[in-house]
């Protein structure tokens, strides 16, 4: 018997049991729906992550740490003490080594590195300006490798920093610091205030006591302060494709270093940095620089690594959703097995007749497997159509709710994965139909046609 | 020519063993109409199943056109049935949800005939049995007589050498039964195919060229009428 004739007969017998066919295929449709959404969301998330990275991060940027354990969460447990090396504890108790000023200077000297900026620890007390209240502040180094949304004023081109007397403020400070508008703030001066408890050596104390000079003793213990003034160069806002909302004020590398040196002077954090960002000379592959630095013992990540990390997260989440889809499919497999067994029982006579007329057992088996495949096809089509329709109509809402930014959608449906999915569902259904079909194929025609 | 030699069929095993057919021997010439007659439970259907390649008795031979069909592999037996045998059953056994056309088309699909050839032969068969106007109707909507006509159309559509009819009029009223009988004998005379009717009805048996009487799984007597 020709396959096409078997398929036609399979399709007709399903049409005669419409309710049962549709109900069985709805179970598959649930799995198909979940899987279609998972595929679309994974695709959308990967493309979104890509947009985020390409619009935010200079591909020439490297993140550099003292050793590679930094990017693996740090080492836990006791470690060998290396004189002169400084470590810092992570919240999880792991210790990471820090970069010294010598490391920074050495990397800065490399011909393939344009610039290197450590993340400075700045313990600023507050920010203010004349006649205004004081507000807490977090100061960071201006990142010339990231594009920002400028609300007022202007920022220099990519890979160029602001000058040492300039500062970029987040939008939130505009009204706090008493400006009428963002535009109004440009060119105005703000002050960042730092304090530190002096670290006093034994000698200093002894000298002060020996001199019997109370003023000198008091001077040793009073807090030391520093007030740094900056001109506002730009007010930056939150962008839809920004990796993180900017809540920190940004100052130039030199300014940040000066403030950090003041804050950490006399502590064990002086000229020690957990991480630094470096910019690789344009035209040089960051990966080769990364490899070279890793060979020297540093821990390095490129912008691509960050992309890989994001993709891993997306893929993991997608895997979880796919898992649920597969769970739904497994359930539907039992539905198909059950339905097809009932179908075989109901059509015992018909099967007997077909075999008596000389139809081969494997053709009878195929008839039932094709019926199962039809059910899989129907379920796949129903599920994926509902997913596409629901997804496309929900996309604008998702975009606005998650503030993904205009032109970015979370669910991206592609025809090829959906077609592949439907084919896979048909195969799964055929597999499920195997046992009932085998039962049909093995039926003895004489027994099946017995009248009494 | 159908030669049945020493066919013996036992159902069940050991102490439950039941001898349904015991050393059956006869020869049926080509184109004959034959009645296998006997009471209910005498073994008529069992004999028919053995002769048509549906069943395999443990002993004996069924030689059709020089080939012992009991020695054929299952694939060859299936092929033999689909090409040389037509079946008509007491309870019609039509596919209720399929149209008349698709019911009759089934044996041709099994023998891999082309769509065009199928259409030609199916319409021809439906015309011969007189239900060509019911081509597109579902079999479930046909009357008993029409269903048996449909079953006959399905049995003859492959132009078989032998048609087996197991109590073909058993489920029909006498007038409808009479028209079906007429149809069967007419086909037997016209096409030259051999007709084997299983029946317990003496009147029907009397219309056949040859009558094989079965009693308790053994041949009681064979009556042949030379014409
Ligand atoms: N599968 C079977 N298992 C056991 N006994 C059977 C089986 N099929 C038929 N028989 C027995 O074989 C005998 C002949 O059956 P059958 O050929 O159907 O009789 P008929 O068609 O003449 O009424 C009966 O006694 C019946 O009970
Ligand atoms: Mg019988």
Image: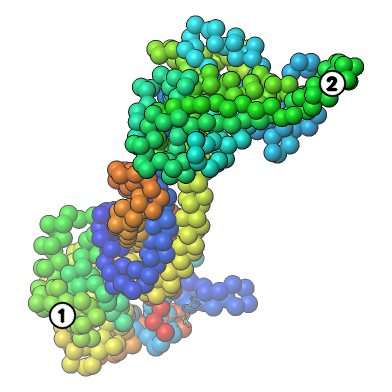
Question: Where, by quadrant of the figure, is residue A48 drawn?
Answer: top left
Tell me which residue sits at (25%, 58%) in the image: A5
Quadrant placement of the N terminus of chain A: bottom left
Q: Quadrant of the C terminus of chain A?
A: bottom left
The answer to which image quadrant residue B119 occupies is: bottom left
Camera-side residue of B164 and A31: A31
In this rendering, position of residue A390 left or right of residue B59? left
Using the image, tell me which numbered label, if any, was put on residue A442. none
Q: Nearer the viewer, mark 2 or mark 1?
A: 2
Q: Nearer the viewer, residue A274 or B94?
A: A274
Q: Is residue A28 left or right of residue B145?
A: right
- The chain ID associated with circle 2 is A
Instruction: Respond whether the residues carrying marks 2 and 1 are from the same subunit.
Output: no
User: Against A191, is A18 above or below?
Assistant: below
Residue nearest the viewer, comparing A118 with B62: A118
Percent of width and height locating residue B103: 23, 70
- Asked if residue A96 can be seen in this view, the reply is no
Specify whether tag 2 is near ligand 1 (CB below 8 Å): no
Residue, disc 1 = B183
Above or below, A408 relative to A80: below
Residue B141 found in image quarter: bottom left
Q: Position of residue A7 (x, y in %)?
A: 28, 58
State left or right for residue A22 relative to residue B139: right
Give the labeled residue for mark 2: A213
Tell me if I can see residue A83 in this picture.
yes
Tell me whether circle 2 and circle 1 mark residues in contact (CB < 8 Å): no
């Amino acid at each position: 018997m020709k396959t096409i004739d078997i398929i036609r007969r399979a399709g007709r017998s399903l049409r005669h049991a419409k309710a049962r066919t549709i109900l069985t295929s709805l179970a598959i449709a649930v799995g198909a729906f979940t899987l279609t959404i998972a595929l679309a969301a994974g695709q959308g998330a990967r493309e979104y992550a890509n947009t985020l990275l390409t619009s935010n991060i200079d591909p020439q940027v490297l993140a550099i740490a003292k050793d590679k354990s930094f990017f693996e969460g740090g080492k836990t447990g006791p470690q060998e003490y290396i004189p002169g090396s400084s470590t810092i504890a992570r919240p999880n108790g792991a210790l990471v080594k820090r970069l010294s000023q010598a490391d920074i200077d050495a990397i800065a000297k490399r011909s393939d590195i344009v610039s290197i900026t450590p993340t400075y620890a700045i313990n600023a007390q507050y920010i203010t300006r004349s006649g205004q209240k004081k507000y807490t502040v977090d100061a960071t180094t201006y990142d010339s490798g990231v594009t920002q949304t400028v609300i007022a004023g202007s920022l220099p081109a990519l890979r160029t920093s602001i000058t040492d007397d300039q500062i970029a403020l987040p939008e939130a400070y505009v009204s706090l610091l008493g400006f009428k508008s963002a535009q109004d703030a440009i060119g105005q001066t703000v002050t960042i205030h730092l304090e530190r408890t002096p670290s006093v050596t034994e000698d200093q104390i002894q000298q002060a006591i020996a001199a019997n000079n109370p003023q000198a003793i008091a001077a040793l213990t009073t807090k030391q302060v520093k007030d740094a003034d900056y001109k506002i160069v730009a007010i930056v806002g939150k962008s839809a494709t920004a990796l993180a909302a900017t809540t920190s004020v940004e100052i130039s590398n030199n300014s940040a270093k000066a403030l950090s040196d003041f804050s950490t002077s006399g502590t064990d954090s002086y000229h020690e940095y957990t991480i630094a960002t470096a910019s690789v000379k344009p035209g040089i592959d960051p990966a080769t620089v990364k490899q070279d630095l890793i060979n020297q013992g540093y821990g390095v990540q490129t912008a691509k690594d960050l992309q890989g990390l994001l993709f891993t997260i997306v893929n993991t989440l997608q895997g979880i959703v796919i898992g649920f889809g597969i769970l739904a499919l497994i359930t539907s497999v039992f539905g198909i097995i059950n339905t097809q067994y009932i179908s075989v029982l109901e059509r015992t006579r018909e099967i007997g007749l077909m075999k008596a007329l000389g139809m081969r057992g494997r053709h009878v088996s195929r008839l039932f497997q094709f019926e199962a495949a039809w059910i899989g096809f129907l379920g796949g089509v129903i599920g994926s159509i509902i997913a596409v329709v629901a997804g496309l109509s929900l996309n604008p809402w998702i975009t606005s709710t998650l503030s993904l930014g205009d032109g970015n959608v979370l669910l991206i449906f592609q025809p090829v994965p959906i077609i592949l999915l439907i084919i896979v569902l048909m195969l799964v259904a055929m597999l499920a139909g195997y046992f009932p079909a085998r039962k049909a194929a093995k039926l003895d025609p004489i027994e099946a046609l017995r009248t009494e | 020519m159908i030669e049945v030699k020493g066919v013996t069929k036992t159902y069940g095993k050991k102490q439950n063993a039941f001898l349904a057919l015991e050393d059956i021997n006869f020869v049926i010439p080509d184109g004959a109409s034959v009645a296998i007659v006997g009471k209910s439970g005498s073994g008529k259907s069992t004999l028919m199943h053995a002769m048509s390649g549906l069943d395999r008795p443990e002993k004996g031979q069924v030689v059709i056109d020089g080939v012992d069909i009991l020695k054929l592999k299952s694939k060859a037996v299936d092929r033999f049935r689909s090409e040389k045998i037509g079946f008509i059953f007491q309870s019609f056994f039509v596919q209720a949800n399929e149209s008349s056309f698709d019911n009759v088309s089934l044996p041709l699909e099994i023998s891999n005939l082309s769509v065009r050839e199928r259409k030609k032969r199916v319409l021809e068969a439906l015309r011969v049995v007189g239900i060509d106007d019911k081509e597109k109707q579902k079999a479930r909507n046909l009357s008993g007589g029409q269903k048996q006509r449909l079953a006959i159309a399905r049995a003859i559509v492959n132009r078989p050498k032998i048609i087996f009819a197991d109590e073909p009029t058993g489920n029909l009223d006498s007038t409808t039964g009479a028209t079906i009988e007429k149809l069967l004998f007419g086909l037997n005379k016209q096409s030259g195919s051999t007709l084997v009717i299983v029946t317990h009805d003496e009147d029907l048996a009397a219309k056949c060229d040859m009558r094989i009487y079965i009693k308790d799984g053994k041949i009681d007597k064979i009556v042949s009428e030379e014409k």
